[in-house]
Every structure is written in C-alpha cells, then in structure tokens.
Image (cartoon, rainbow, N blue to C red):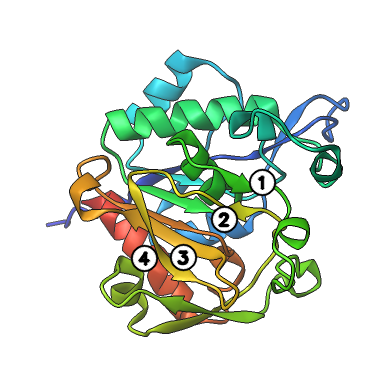
Amino acid sequence: MKTRRAKLPVILVTPCVQKHGAEFSDCSSNLSDQYPGALLSAGGIPWILPCIPNRDMVREAVAHCDGVLLTGGEDINPGLYRARLPGSLRKTVVPTEPQRDLVEIMLIEETCLQKKPLLGICRGHQLLNVAFGGTLLVDIPSQCPGALNHSRLDLKNQIVHDTRLSPDSQMRRIFGSDALGVNSSHHQAIDRLAKPFRATASSPDGIVEAIELKPGERGLFPYLSSVQFHPERLYARHPEFLVFFRHFVEACRR
C-alpha cells in the first residue's frame, strides 16, 4: 500500500519590476534564484506573484498559498512614509518601483486579512513597517553619522557585522543565541517602528535588524518574521539560516 506524501507548502514570493526585460524589452518581473532556492531547501514550493496591481488577483493568490515572502530590491517610494523630503536626501533615493509598492501593500493587507504566515526580507522588511504606519531612514550615512557601512554589496554573501537578539524573542528561540552574524546590503532602514511591532535584533549602531509582533498584536498574523539582512544569501554556507527558513516553512505547513 502506497503512503501519501505530505503536501509541500506553497509560498507566494514577490519579484522586482524590471522596466526593460529580456523579452522585447518589456516591463518584466525579476527575482534572484537565491529566494526560491532557500524555500526549496527548507521544504517549500516557491510561487512567484506577477507584479500587476490587481486586487482580485492578489486576493486569490493569497487564498491559494500557504505563506508569503516579501523580498529585497530597490528603494520604497518615500512619499509613502514622508510628506516632504529635503533635496539632499532625495538625491540618495534610487529609482523606485511604485507599481511594486502598490502590489506588495495589497499583498500585506490580504495576508493579514486571510491570516497567512509572512516573512519579510530587506526591502520587504521595510515595506511591512511602512504598510502599518511606520517610517524609514531614507539614507543611513546621511542621517546617522558614525553608523556602520551597511551597504556592503561587495560582501553580499558574507557575514559583515553582528546583531544582538532580544532574550525573549522569536529570533532568539530560532537561532539559540544572543548574537548573530549577518550580511548587510542596504542604505535605508526602519526609523519609527509601526505600532504592532517590536524590534528583536539590532546592529551595534542601533539599526533595527529584525522585528516581530508585540504580544498583544499576535492575532494579526499566525506567524510573522521580518529581517533587514539577506538570509537567502547565507543559508548554503551557514546552516543556522537554513533553520530560519525551515521555521517559516513549517509555520506555512501548519
């Protein structure tokens, strides 16, 4: 008698928007294979969401998935979290993806409404905070003199600085340590934290490296984890980050 294989959880993954893609130079979706690779290694099935701002499509996609992953990418439109931006800061903002911002905000709303697990990485971490009313540091070097160099694209696959994990946090339970070495490929970060969240990891200069729901807000999502670093670029050589993805995939399986 054949035994039935356990159903692998399907994880909805957001891509970047590429204005001139490979086919006919059309506006296209673009996603690093590191994200689906990490999910596959952790026991999940990645499903890439088309970056088309259609509420019905987003609603149905969330209904048919077991969890959502918000990925990294370019800067978020500062108009979503700041009414006015000085010219000196505006110059630091790279070309934004307003279509992607809209799709992902819809996606966060639907994921919350339909009570699905959510994982945010880098840009996704920042947008999650913005979607719930928080703000961002537009440019760390300009606004935080003396901060670490967080834009280490030259070492994107390597540990570049430590983070301190809160003792009573989900991050502490997953990694089993008070400290965690991470990579760093960003020039923006969370500034004012949105009301439902609490910071559970920070770099030595105080940049928020991870957030989770406050105890009184845990009904918003059945599982939520959000990090500023890129664990998908570390899991192959650092097993603790594969454990991190497995923790998320297991939440999606449940």
Q: Where does residue 68 sit, x and y in percent of width and height? A: 42, 43
Structural crowding at the residue carrying mark 4, measured as other residues with C-alpha within 10 Å and reported as few (<14), some (14–19) or many (≥20): many
Please tell me whether residue 122 is drawn above or below residue 99 in the rendered image.
Answer: below
Q: Earlier in the sequence, mark 3 or mark 4?
A: 3
Contact (Cβ within 8 Å) of mark 2 with mark 1? yes
Viewer-proximal residue, 117 or 88? 88
Residue marked by disc 2: 35
Give the numbered dot on residue 246: 4
Could you tell me if residue 131 is visible in this image? yes
Secondary structure under tag 1 reads: loop
Give the numbered dot on residue 41: 3
Mark 3 and mark 2: span between their CA atoms?
10 Å
Mark 2 and mark 1: span between their CA atoms?
8 Å
Q: Where does residue 40 sit, x and y in percent of width and height? A: 47, 59
Quadrant the N terminus occupies: bottom left
**252 displayed left or right of 107:** left
Please tell me whether residue 142 is drawn above or below residue 178 in the rendered image.
Answer: above
Contact (Cβ within 8 Å) of mark 3 with mark 2? no
Q: Where does residue 9 sit, x and y in percent of width and height? A: 33, 48
Mark 4 and mark 2: span between their CA atoms?
13 Å
Please tell me whether residue 224 is drawn above or below residue 43 in the rendered image.
Answer: above
Structural crowding at the residue carrying mark 1, measured as other residues with C-alpha within 10 Å and reported as few (<14), some (14–19) or many (≥20): some
Look at label 4 and name its amino acid. Arg
